[in-house]
């Protein structure tokens, strides 16, 4: 699994590389499989989304299994070993989202899944608001600061898929990383504090978004406080990351 910007030039480059790798697959079938990998039902749906992109296109995940499944629907044999991660040297726009450490991480418990979901929702919203991007040198929320000093953070409000109000925080963690915090049923600006706990709200999660060697959420699942009545609801949110991986070891 890797990530690519939703731009015509990036997708043309991706398809050109895939045509070299898979010369026996029809061009139209590759086009539809790329759309499926990006979570769209058809190439037409992908084109519609491309038309909405502006000067700074959003990144989206390329799901290996969805690409392979769509090709199987066209009658091609399964290729379970395929990974878009292999193409990052051939397609310059591709960003890696799966560090080696991700293979050892699973979100097994309700607490771990709830932490993951809350963090992904907060990062997705920050990306949607264009407070930051997945590039390590981008800090849209504080563009005028001296690059040699860490920037002040920024809070933002949003609504979770289950309807609960939330407040997020993004800060400069250095070396391209971002500190990300999120609180449910928030209280004041306590979400800014990395150890706020229940002072920030009825649930509080904190972690880091890696952007230097790729784009993924560092799995700091112990940085989580949650009132028991909320746990199941947060654990069962269905949310797809907007162009970044959802697991990887904490970088010290």
Image (cartoon, helix red, strand yellow):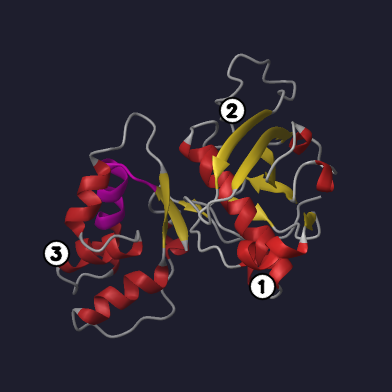
Q: Residue at x 32, y 31 (%)?
A: 54
Main structural element of the magenta stretch: helix, strand or loop? Answer: helix
Which residues are drawn in magenta?
Answer: 5-16
Q: Is residue 3 magenta?
A: no
Q: Front-most of 111 and 53? A: 111
> What residue is disc 1 on?
106
- Determine the image quadrant of residue 93: top left
Expressed as whole percent of the image width and height from the top left, the position of residue 106 reads 66, 72
Residue at the extreme front: 229
Are the two marked residues, 1 and 3, in contact with CB atoms closer than 8 angstroms?
no
Picture mark count: 3
> What residue is disc 2 on?
139
Q: Residue at x 57, y 61 (%)?
A: 98
Q: CA distance from mark 1 to mark 2?
A: 30 Å
With respect to residue 60, does 233 lie above or below?
below
> Dot 3 lies on which element?
helix
> Dot 2 lies on which element?
loop
Q: Is residue 10 visible?
A: yes
Expressed as whole percent of the image width and height from the top left, the position of residue 7 reads 30, 42
Which of the numbered marks, if any, corresponds to residue 28?
3
Q: CA distance from mark 1 to mark 3?
A: 36 Å
Going by the image, does 155 lie left or right of 224? left
Going by the image, does 185 lie left or right of 80? right
Reading the chain from its start, which is encountered first: label 1 or label 3?
3
- Determine the image quadrant of residue 75: bottom left
């Amino acid at each position: 699994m890797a990530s690519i910007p939703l731009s015509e030039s990036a997708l043309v480059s991706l398809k050109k590389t895939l045509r070299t790798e898979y010369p026996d697959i029809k061009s139209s079938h590759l086009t539809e499989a790329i759309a499926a990998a990006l979570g769209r039902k058809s190439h037409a749906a992908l084109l519609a989304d491309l038309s909405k992109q502006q000067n700074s296109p959003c990144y989206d995940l390329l799901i290996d299994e969805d690409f392979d499944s769509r090709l199987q629907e066209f009658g091609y044999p399964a290729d379970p070993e395929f990974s878009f991660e292999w193409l990052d040297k051939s397609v310059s726009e591709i960003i890696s989202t799966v560090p080696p450490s991700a293979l050892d991480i699973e979100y097994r418990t309700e607490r771990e899944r709830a932490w993951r979901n809350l963090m992904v929702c907060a990062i997705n919203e920050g990306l949607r608001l264009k407070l930051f991007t997945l590039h390590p040198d981008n800090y849209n929320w504080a563009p005028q600061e001296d690059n040699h000093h860490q920037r002040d953070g920024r809070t933002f409000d949003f609504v979770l898929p289950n309807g609960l109000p939330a407040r997020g925080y993004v800060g400069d963690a250095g070396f391209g990383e971002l500190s990300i915090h999120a609180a449910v049923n928030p209280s004041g600006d306590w979400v800014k504090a990395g150890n706020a706990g229940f002072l920030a709200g009825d649930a509080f999660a904190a972690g880091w978004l890696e952007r230097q060697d790729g784009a993924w959420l560092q799995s700091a699942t112990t940085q989580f406080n949650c009132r028991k009545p909320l746990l199941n609801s947060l654990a069962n949110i269905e949310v797809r990351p907007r162009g970044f991986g959802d697991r990887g070891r904490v970088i010290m």
